[in-house]
Image: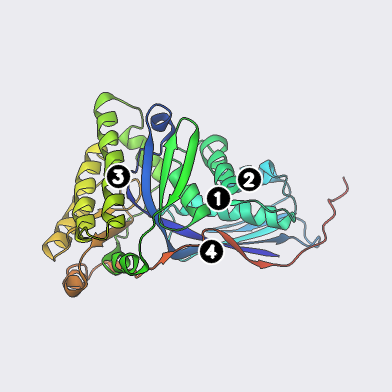
């Protein structure tokens, strides 16, 4: 039996520049962190006592006699890609899917990690990220960028750089005290709305035009600005909050599906309560709102958002990992 634990990510700056159609022509970059909210994938070989040969449990339960009958496209494609047979897979998570925290990509990374471990093989972080990108973007044909799979695999507070040759991951090096203060100045609330990231990308129009390309170049430059704020201990950390406000207002110009009147109203309420900035996490349309607000004003924000669920969180460093490993002896079924 294998159990993997894979974090969700919080993206601050550069979203959209991790789209392959953009960074193959222009350099892209994002600044993001993983947080202590996880998905767990439990995989073992299914004992041969049943009429079905594979059992899957996620938001629904599937019992099938061959991989091609699996309805969940990501699980079906991953099992065929790695030739997984006769398994029981269970998925559970700390936070809901389709909420702007890269949950589907964390699942993809965690599932691949579990499959390799069940085979008795080691897959490093780059291999897991690369194969999760291939699984989601090529095999499942889901629109979106590359940052989520990379963040889930590597973990930590990073700048991820993209170009025509691929990507590189650069940890943001700041003092523990400054990093802790950044964490304390951030508050996250669940709007209650969920959506598929790929649907939002399609609704916004993922094709490149001159205006969109210009906007993405500016969003890419904000990654440089944000990194300088974090790494220069002489710079007031509150500038990070102001920059979040700027990038959110810039991002809303990307398409009509990024925000809604309800989300705009919630955001204004947060700013009026004392937040210096914030943004909706993910592609847009719903999910989690993050605000940058100094601790002495946070009670005001809690009251302003009393109708929303407050989600405390902490930054994490580990990325995907195997937290339980019990080897199994498995012989393929004779046909």
- CA distance for labels 1 and 4: 13 Å
Give residue 92's mark: 4
Q: Residue furthest left?
A: 272
Which residue is found at the position 51% from the left and 54% from the top? 154
Q: Is residue 156 left or right of residue 210?
A: right
Callout 2: SS: helix
Give residue 78's mark: 2
The disc, 1 or 2, on the residue closer to the chain's N-terminal end is: 2
- Residue 269 visible? The answer is yes
Whether residues under marks 2 and 3 lie with C-beta atoms below 8 angstroms apart, the answer is no
Estimate the x, y position of residue 40 in percent, counting from the top left.
56, 63
Callout 3: SS: helix
Whether residues under marks 1 and 2 lie with C-beta atoms below 8 angstroms apart, the answer is yes
Give residue 224's mark: 3
The disc, 2 or 3, on the residue closer to the chain's N-terminal end is: 2
Q: In the image, is residue 101 above or below residue 307?
A: above
- CA distance for labels 3 and 4: 36 Å
- Neighbour class for label 2 at 10 Å: few (<14), some, many (≥20)? many
Estimate the x, y position of residue 42 in percent, counting from the top left.
63, 63
Q: Quadrant of residue 320?
A: bottom right
- Neighbour class for label 3 at 10 Å: few (<14), some, many (≥20)? some
The disc, 1 or 4, on the residue closer to the chain's N-terminal end is: 4
Estimate the x, y position of residue 234 in percent, counting from the top left.
22, 60
Whether residues under marks 3 and 4 lie with C-beta atoms below 8 angstroms apart, the answer is no
Estimate the x, y position of residue 124 in percent, counting from the top left.
62, 51
Depth check, mark 3 against mark 1: the one in front is 3
Which residue is found at the position 47% from the left and 43% from the top? 168
Quickly name the residue at label 1.
108
Callout 4: SS: strand
Q: Quadrant of residue 219?
A: top left
């Amino acid at each position: 039996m294998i159990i993997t634990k894979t974090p969700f990510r919080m993206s601050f700056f550069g979203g959209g520049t991790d789209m392959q159609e953009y960074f193959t022509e222009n350099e892209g970059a994002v600044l993001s962190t993983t947080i202590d909210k996880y998905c767990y994938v439990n995989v073992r070989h299914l004992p041969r006592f049943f009429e079905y040969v594979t059992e899957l449990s996620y938001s629904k339960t599937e019992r099938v006699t061959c991989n091609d009958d699996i309805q969940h496209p990501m699980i079906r494609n991953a099992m065929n890609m790695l030739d997984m047979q006769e398994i029981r897979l269970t998925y559970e998570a700390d936070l809901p899917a389709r909420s702007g925290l890269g949950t589907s990509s964390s699942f993809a990374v965690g599932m691949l990690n579990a499959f390799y471990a069940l085979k008795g093989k080691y897959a490093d972080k780059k291999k897991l990220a690369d194969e999760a990108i291939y699984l989601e973007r090529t095999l499942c044909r889901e629109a979106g960028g590359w940052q989520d799979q990379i963040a889930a695999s590597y973990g930590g507070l990073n700048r991820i750089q993209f170009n025509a040759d691929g990507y590189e991951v650069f940890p943001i090096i700041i003092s523990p005290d400054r990093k802790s203060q950044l964490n304390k100045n951030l508050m996250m609330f669940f709007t209650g709305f969920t959506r598929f990231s790929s649907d939002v990308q399609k609704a916004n129009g993922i094709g490149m035009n001159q205006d969109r390309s210009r906007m993405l170049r500016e969003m890419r430059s904000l990654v440089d600005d944000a990194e300088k704020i974090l790494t220069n201990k002489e710079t007031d950390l509150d500038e990070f909050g102001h920059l979040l406000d700027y990038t959110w207002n810039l991002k809303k110009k990307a398409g009509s599906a990024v925000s809604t009147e309800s989300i705009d109203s919630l955001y204004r309420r947060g700013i009026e309560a004392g937040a210096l900035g914030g943004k909706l996490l993910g592609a847009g349309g719903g999910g989690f709102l993050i605000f940058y607000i100094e601790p002495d004003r946070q009670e005001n924000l809690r009251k302003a958002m009393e109708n929303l669920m407050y989600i405390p969180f902490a930054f994490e460093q580990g990325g995907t990992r195997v937290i339980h490993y019990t080897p199994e002896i498995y012989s393929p079924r004779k046909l």
